Image (cartoon, grey):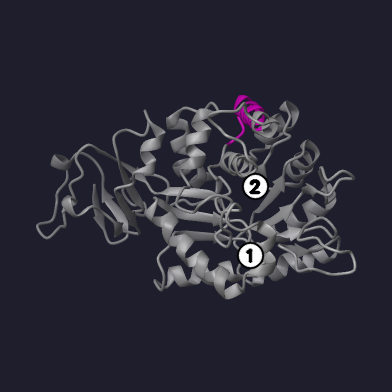
Amino acid sequence: MLVRGERIAAAGAAESLETPPDARVLELPGATLLPGLIEGHSHLFLHPYDDTSWRDQVLGESLAERTARAVVHAEASLLAGVTTMRDLGTEGAGSADAGLKTAIEKGIIPGPRLIVTTRAIVATGAYGPRGAPEHRLPKGAEVADEADLVRVTRDQIGRGADWIKIYADYRWGPNGEARPTFTQEELALVVRVAGSSGRPVVAHASTAEGMRRATLAGVRTIEHGDGGTSEVFALMAERGVALCPTLAAAEAVALYAGWRKDAQPEPPRIRAKRESFRLALEAGVPICFGGDVGVYPHGDNVRELVLMVDYGMSPLEALRTATSGNARIFNLGGLGHIKPGRIADLIAVPGDPTLDISTLRQVELVMKGGKIVKAPRKAF
């Protein structure tokens, strides 16, 4: 592999490359070289819920503290091999993700290339934090309905959103169960407004009906998909809508609730996750690597890939979701492959991750845009 500037100049066996005499040579015997990982569902402004609950983070932590944490989280993910990250909502921290993205681009702080959504959009009455009805608590996303969806979408674009995120359903049913929030027409309106600016839409949806509406409305990806049916997944596959299953977040929440993974049967939600993931694979739905990191520790992003393999994917298929697959879904033409002319976002891990996906937890080399971010001293 030969890198010049921020791009890959040549790829192949060392003896086949014309190495300039002043080249800096790295040797990593026994390692596998891969494109940098592309994380598809993260929350840099959140930290694990067993440390501080989501509600207490949104209501009790200052914007300064949350931004400071986000800086630390961004570096942790980069050092873990994530060179590009789609952040799906600041959860009460306004448009601070857009500022974080700018700081990374200017080289002020280290971190992955960011794709940001700012505040996300929710329906009136659907989202939290909730409290006594006489109080209007700050929300973890931006509230909008009907015609106001146009203004809010445009405002988020103006504040730096690369994608628009909308909640197609949420836990607001009569018994606290997930139910659709926006109508299909409202979702389609957001897709049209965002699309006119060249921006795609991502939908939070865990019910079959919420997923169906979002798919027909034209969103690019659906997050979670817990209640997906064969029919809904067939529709997603037909329309090329990708699924970010967020398996790791579901597992983390179950563990926080007391599940002992090695000693107890899987809780119903985990069994449902396994089944919905199986149905999505059978239907041929494009799968996005994105585990909802922030619910669990930043830097442990690979946890999602390990679970994807455990739930039925081959290690090679899982690797593709985190590289060329997400590059295609997110329209990142210069990333996700090791080819001449592509951006030199590269990682190296010991052994062969196509045989053992967990080797991705031992990243030895991280290069972003041709610059070495992490490497063992012995490599030079």
Query: In which quarter of the view is residue 126 placed?
Result: bottom right
Image coords of residue 27 (percent x, y): 17, 47
How dense is the environment of label 1, judged by Cα within 10 Å: few (below 14), some, or many (20 and up)? many
Q: Which mark is residue 41?
A: none
The one nearer the camera, 186 or 271, is 271
Q: Which mark is residue 220?
A: 2
Q: Is residue 125 visible?
A: yes
**What secondary structure is found at the residue carrying circle 1?**
loop
Q: Is residue 119 visible?
A: no
Image coords of residue 70 (percent x, y): 52, 65
Q: Which residue is mark 1?
A: 118
How dense is the environment of label 2, judged by Cα within 10 Å: few (below 14), some, or many (20 and up)? many
Query: Mark 1–mark 2 contact, CB under 8 Å?
Result: no
Closer to the observer: label 1 or label 2? 1
The one nearer the camera, 107 or 258, is 258
Q: Which residues are magenta?
A: 273-286
Q: Is residue 35 left or right of residue 18?
A: right
**What secondary structure is found at the residue carrying circle 2?**
loop
